[in-house]
Image: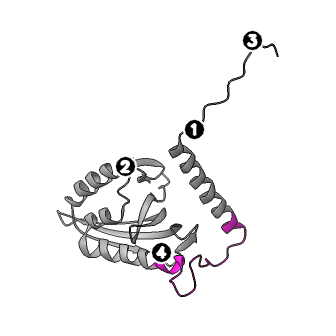
Amino acid sequence: MSSSTRVLPAPFPSRKLRIRSLLLAVTLAGCVLGAAGASPSHSVTPDGAPSVDQAVRAFMQTVSHSVTQDGPTAWIKYFDASPAFFMAVNGQMAFPNPAAAQEGTRKFAQTIRHIELNWGDDLRVDPLSDEFAVVAVSWREIQVDTAGHSVTETGYFTGLAEYREGRWQFRDAHWSSPVSSH
């Protein structure tokens, strides 16, 4: 190579992109390891403290109860309010940030008279650290709209739960429903 030819280093990805890429890699590694030899979740907390697994399981029960009791707007208190939050539905970005999630949830709530959210008995909690855990579970939801029409939906939910400011919340979430075959 001549002295006049310089090879420039590739630009470094932003810190935010590196963190998201790292979280994605850790999440995928956890899924692969879990599928290869599914083992019970373990505590990464000091002795005497509730395990991350136990705490996140309790959090998931609280979410289901709260949404059923208080309606769709209850979701807002469980979404991370930082710019990191996003939600996808059936492979499409539904809410790219917390402001969109709050607005969309409030609009949806105006169309619903009653909602009942039930998680399946297949809840998986994969603790990543004391502050992060991946959750995955089947779900069933009954929605009654303002006109009294009832719809039952089912599917699968995955998300990254984060313990911050003294409570668990969803840093991201993905809902999927079975595709009907026509």
The amino acid sitting under disc 1 is Pro
Q: Is residue 138 above or below residue 108?
A: below
The residue at which mark 1 appears reads as: 13
* Front one among 49 and 24: 49
Percent coordinates x, y for residue 74 in the rendering: 28, 67
Residue 175: name its quadrant. bottom left
Percent coordinates x, y for residue 40 in the rendering: 63, 79
| Circle on res. 4 | 3
Q: Quick check: can you spot residue 161?
A: yes
The residue at which mark 4 appears reads as: 56
Write down the region rendered in magenta. 33-57
Q: Nearer the viewer, mark 2 or mark 3?
A: 3
From the viewer's perspective, tell me whether residue 95 is left or right of residue 91: left
The amino acid sitting under disc 3 is Ser
Residue 147, magenta (yes or no): no
The amino acid sitting under disc 4 is Val
Residue 35, magenta (yes or no): yes
